[in-house]
Amino acid sequence: MKNIALLASGSGSNVENIIRYFRNDANLNFPLIISNKQDAYVHERAEKLHIPSFFYKRDSFENGEVLAFLLENKIDCIVLAGFLLKIPLNIIQAYPDKIINIHPALLPEFGGKGMYGSRVHEAVVANKKSESGITIHYVNENYDEGQIIFQARCKVLPTDTPEDVAAKVHELEYRYFPEIIKATFLPDTEPDKAPKRTRLPAQ
Ligand code: GRF
């Protein structure tokens, strides 16, 4: 059994999807949610899902308080699902190759500091891209630069608004993120069902 902490700064629809997906899974446990925003909607979702959620401000991530909390709770791995703070070195060093993030575009394009949420989809549309997608990657000390684990693509039509792109990307996130979490942190279970770590063709 592995204990995975979910970190989110916003709405938390991915958090909810992950928790529902793994609800009856005997191998992966999601005992807690952490947010750096006290008023994030993810706290309300957590309450409805009966999962404890905690607020820690930026300083607590940097001064070791959050790390101590993770260790106390026997957290093995960390999943960032719309988490906007940079993960400080103290946590990265304590969890080597044990932290993954989802980015709502095809990295290395449209990544880096300031590239989050609707800004990503606005940039994709402004640059007249014909496709976008998701990237799930390991987290290192630089924003969006850790090793890529998985990407999936969607088409972007010339008439698509940033909201249209966001909806397509969210669909990919709900479809693939739980499976990739499982394949990454429990690579030996159900090998037939584990998605391959390759790029999928555009859909
Ligand atoms: C997702 O698009 C994710 O890729 C990005 O932030 C968004 C979070 O959405 N990092 P939600 O809070 O899960 O609805």
Image (cartoon, helix red, strand yellow):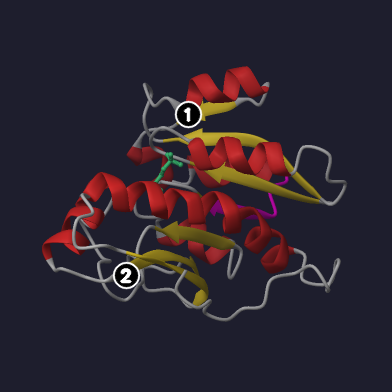
Quarter residue 77 falls in: bottom right
The answer to which quarter of the image holds residue 60 is: top left
Q: Amino acid at mark 1?
A: Val
Residue sticking out furthest to the left? 126
The circle on residue 42 is: 1
27 above or below 200? above
In this view, the residue in front, 142 or 150, is 150
Q: Position of residue 42 (x, y in %)?
A: 47, 29
Question: Which residue appears at 88% of the width and 46% of the height?
Answer: 26
Please indicate whether residue 59 sits to the left or right of residue 12 in the image: left
Q: Nearer the viewer, residue 113 or 57?
A: 113
Q: Is mark 1 within 8 Å of ligand 1?
A: yes
Quick check: 59 left or right of 17? left
Q: Residue at x 63, y 25 (%)?
A: 52
In space, the residues marked 1 and 2 are separated at their CA atoms by 29 Å
User: Which region of the structure is painted magenta?
Assistant: 74-79
Residue at left offset 15%, top offset 68%: 128
User: Label 1: how many residues lie within 10 Å, few (<14), some (14-19) or many (20+)?
Assistant: many
Q: Quadrant of residue 140?
A: bottom left
Residue placed under numbered mark 2 in the picture: 131
The percent coordinates of residue 47 (x first, y second) are 59, 18
Residue 132: x and y in percent read 34, 66
Q: Is residue 170 magenta?
A: no
Describe residue 184's horizontal placement relative to residue 43 as left or right.
Answer: right
Q: Residue 190: percent from the left, percent from the top?
A: 86, 67
